[in-house]
Image: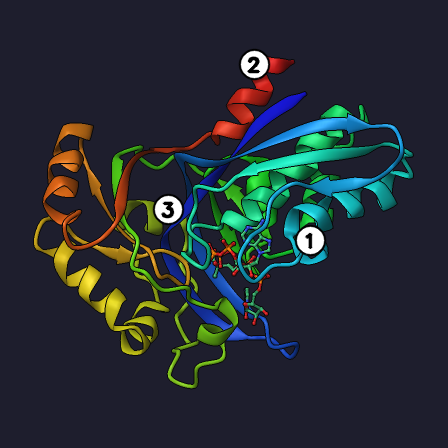
Amino acid sequence: MLTLPAPAKLNLMLHILGRRADGYHELQTLFQFLDHADELTFNLRDDGEIHLHAQLPGVDHEHNLIVRAARLLQRHSGTRLGADIHLHKRLPMGGGLGGGSSDAATTLLGLDHLWQLRLERTTLAGLGLSLGADVPVFVHGHAAFAEGVGERLTPVEPEEPWYLVLVPQVSVSTAEIFSDPLLTRDSPAIKVRSVLERGGRNDCQPVVEKRYEEVRNALILLNNFVSARLTGTGGCVFGAFPNKPEADRVLDQLSVSLPGFVAKGSNVSMLHRKLEALS
Ligand SMILES: C[C@](O)(CO)[C@H](O)COP(=O)(O)OP(=O)(O)OC[C@H]1O[C@@H](n2ccc(N)nc2=O)[C@H](O)[C@@H]1O
Ligand SMILES: Nc1ncnc2c1ncn2[C@@H]1O[C@H](COP(=O)(O)OP(=O)(O)OP(=O)(O)O)[C@@H](O)[C@H]1O
């Protein structure tokens, strides 16, 4: 039995540079992980079956990214082994925290370990990219500046503050935000150094604020205490604090209005810290 975390990510900034012929967007984004995670447990099966013992609203078994990742790895490796997989879901779906992508990455790394495949990280990241643009960063497990459609990664070491994340009760479809005619797609490319020194913005934020009153309100609430921003295509919003007690104090005041949580930012994902301890 193997139990592994599938941590959340934040997009500390997200600039949209353009749109490719296939509809995907060229972007620049800064990823950092949170010490807040789903939990997956893998048990070996020798009959080649993949069974996920969890039901997510609106996602059937074969479409769950965990099952898709497991089958992809089976096909790629030719293994005759299978797995029973249990999921403890903590990350909100459609929250911009990358929960589905992170579950997929943890499945690729977890089953690679359980099935003793010893594939290269770059191979697993390549398989992951076919499941979603955010999967490779979770496979590599280091905070990164991402370019292209999100697959070209440069490892970075931003500060690791405590974050307060508010969870508006909406599920935002990434495809819906990327297809909005009001989305600006003309941000100039910038250098990673400039992002680390001066930060950036989230180009999706104005579109998401316009479409979702709940997100607008969450930003107003959090902006009373700290500079608040949307992660990914939302709907979660976050602010940074120098220590946990300050973040907890603000959460105490805001939790009457909205659910949220406090978590440490980390440049090495919880998943990779756990895998390191196993080897
Ligand atoms: C915006 C981010 O959340 C930033 O972290 C991600 O790049 C989105 O990653 P993801 O959820 O893994 O996205 P995918 O499942 O690959 O794509 C969902 C949908 O978002 C749009 N999409 C996604 C990534 C990208 N660079 N351009 C896009 O236009 C496409 O319409 C796609 O159909
Ligand atoms: N294991 C899974 N966990 C969550 N969502 C899943 C999973 N498998 C498939 N999905 C589908 O993927 C969609 C996106 O889920 P996810 O939690 O990754 O959203 P997100 O945090 O907004 O992602 P991102 O920031 O990458 O856009 C869900 O609405 C769901 O339909």
Q: Position of residue 99 (x, y in %)?
A: 50, 48
| Viewer-closest of 99 and 40 | 40
Q: Is residue 67 visible?
A: yes
- Which quadrant of the view contains residue 250? top left
Mark 1 and mark 3: Cα distance apart in space: 43 Å
Q: Which badge, 1 or 3, comes first in the chain's sequence?
A: 1
Up/down of 32 relative to 178, above or below: above
Q: Which badge, 3 or 2, comes first in the chain's sequence?
A: 3
Q: Amino acid at mark 2?
A: Ala
Position of residue 139 in the picture relative to residue 17 (left or right): right
Q: Is residue 126 visible?
A: no
Mark 1 and mark 2: Cα distance apart in space: 31 Å
Q: Position of residue 84 (x, y in %)?
A: 72, 34
Give the residue displayed 60% in from the left and 77% down from the top.
23
**Count of numbered labels shown in the rendering:** 3
Residue, disc 3: 193
Checking the image for residue 277, the label placed there is 2
Q: Position of residue 241 (x, y in %)?
A: 18, 38
Give the residue displayed 67% in from the left and 33% down from the top.
109
Q: Could you tell me which secondary element the residue under label 1 belongs to?
A: helix
- Which part of the image, by quadrant, shows the C terminus? top right
Mark 3 and mark 2: Cα distance apart in space: 32 Å
Q: Residues within 10 Å of mark 2 (few under 14, many from 20)?
A: few
Give the residue displayed 31% in from the left and 35% down from the top.
263
Q: Amino acid at mark 1?
A: His
Q: Foreground mark, 3 or 2?
A: 2
Q: Foreground mark, 1 or 2?
A: 1
Q: Could you tell me which secondary element the residue under label 2 belongs to?
A: helix
Residue, disc 1: 61
